[in-house]
Image: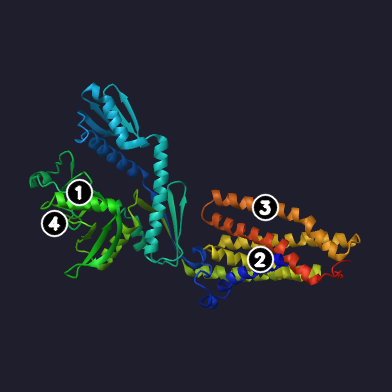
Amino acid sequence: MFKKLAIIFVAVFCVLLAVPTMAPGTAKYFPSWVRPIPLGLDLKGGAQLLLEVDTQTMMREKSAQLYEDVRAALIDRDKGVVRFSNLRNSDGVVSFVVRDEQDVSRAKGRLKSALGSSVDIDSDGRTITLSYSDKQKQEMVADALTRSIEIVRRRIDALGTKEPSIQTQGGKYILIQLPGVDNPEHIKELIGQTAKMTFHLVNENIPAEQVAAGRAPAGTEFLPLMDAPGQMVPVYTRVEVSGESLKDSQADFDQNNMPVVSTVFDATGARRFAKLTTEHVGERFAIVLDGKVLSAPVIREPIPGGRGQISGGFTLQGAKDLAVLLRSGALPAPLSVIEERTVGAGLGADTIAQGKIGSAVGVLLVLIFMIFFYRGFGLIADIVLLVNLAMIIGISALFGATLTLPGIAGIVLTLGMAVDANILPFERIRDEVRAGVPTLRAVDVGFHRSMKTVLDGNLTNLICSLILFQFGAGPIRGFAVTLSIGVITTLFTCLALSKVMIDWYMNGKNKKIGYIK
């Protein structure tokens, strides 16, 4: 008895999950975690963006950073300077010549300690080369893609966009679907910014004539001022504090009621920022965002605690956008929009209306067919079929799935398979009754002997749908998700719920089954 009650409870619970979707006005009577299933881009309308991750630029930046790390490791005064010459970066390979042959092993050990196993280190006499292997490059590209997707998701969520779909495609592309968004320009601009922020000291020893001539000495680079692109600021290439140490950033107002961005560093960033502002009081430091100097203020006093403000003549919206960018993190590689589509809501409304008509006609014909051929058992099968439909919708809504046209196709296909799963035990019961077996015994035998066939057929479909989900993308994945949920609900309703309802219908008696001829 407990098993039967558990089956009924699961069925009722899943049907209740579908109520807010099937009757949207009732959503307010349910808990917050029971929400209507959201509509996809093809049904609701909206925008679709295909972004490409610029891995070549990322690898150039990695090589440039490797160059700086090698230089810093070799001139580390605490461990003893290793004398070298001809340090250069060519096509992603950093090389240099050790002046004293006896220092070769010491230099290699120093570099292995500083860089770990992430870089291949080779030597030919006094010449040492460092580069990333193909496997390491592939791992960096895969990591950049994963991090980019997560950062894009955080940026879009911070803007309040509902039910976005963000997924990888083709190894270096990101597909973004934004249902209900008519103008994606602002989102495009926001998610495309790298938002890489770093803090550098300003090189005050460079005369203005040299800056104007563009001749930057080693260890210094000239970066444009964001508010005045024609004005260049000489900054040391060494990164004093990285934006990766930022823990939080919020739009705020300063004492003059001007919009600023308040920043909070983590423990590591706070120590570095405090050290920077303590050791360089009276000097300027540059706040660099995406290769441009946001501002270059003078350090008036030490700033402990890891809290600061970024000012730069922001508008309130500009301060909010920058805070979102910094809070969500810097993109590991630039993103570029290579395809953009906008789907009108009217097309989705027409599709929904036609889908409702087609589904209603199809379901009605199936219900009539089952009652005509199987009488009382057919009525039970119809009830089970409707419960199955509600369970698919309810479970999809519970797990946050989005309803799309391929998803609707998956539901229709599932209902067809569910009818077949009901017919198999009914036909087996008919054969047993014709052989003279009492109806109660025929029901048990019919379900038992048909179970293997039903399981084999549905598990095969489940395996296929999981393969589609694993290797497919976009609409194919939506179809696979709906089909997978449908297979599970079909097995539950046809093998468990249907048997319980027939047992209650028989009520422990050998009733005459009307459809047996």
CA distance separating discs 3 and 2: 17 Å
CA distance separating discs 1 and 2: 62 Å
Q: Position of residue 38 (x, y in %)?
A: 51, 67
Other residues around mark 1 within 10 Å, as few (<14) / some (14–19) / many (≥20):
many
Badge 1 marks a residue whose secondary structure is strand
Q: Is residue 411 left or right of residue 93?
A: right
Q: Which residue is mark 3?
A: 459
Q: Residue at x 61, y 58 (%)?
A: 483
Badge 3 marks a residue whose secondary structure is helix
Q: Quadrant of residue 250?
A: bottom left
Q: Position of residue 326 (x, y in %)?
A: 30, 57
Q: Which residue is mark 1?
A: 200
Other residues around mark 4 within 10 Å, as few (<14) / some (14–19) / many (≥20):
few
CA distance separating discs 3 and 4: 69 Å
Image quadrant occupied by the N terminus? bottom right
Q: Earlier in the sequence, mark 2 or mark 4?
A: 4
Badge 4 marks a residue whose secondary structure is loop
CA distance separating discs 2 and 4: 69 Å
Q: Earlier in the sequence, mark 1 or mark 2?
A: 1
Other residues around mark 3 within 10 Å, as few (<14) / some (14–19) / many (≥20):
some
In this view of the protein, which residue sits in the foreground, 307 or 476?
307
Question: For the residues carrying marks 2 and 4, which lies nearer the camera in this image?
Answer: 4
The answer to whether mark 1 and mark 4 are in CB contact below 8 A is no
In this view of the protein, which residue sits in the foreground, 117 or 274?
274
Q: Earlier in the sequence, mark 1 or mark 4?
A: 1
Q: Which residue is mark 4?
A: 301
Which residue type carries mark 1?
A: His
Q: Is residue 420 left or right of residue 97?
A: right
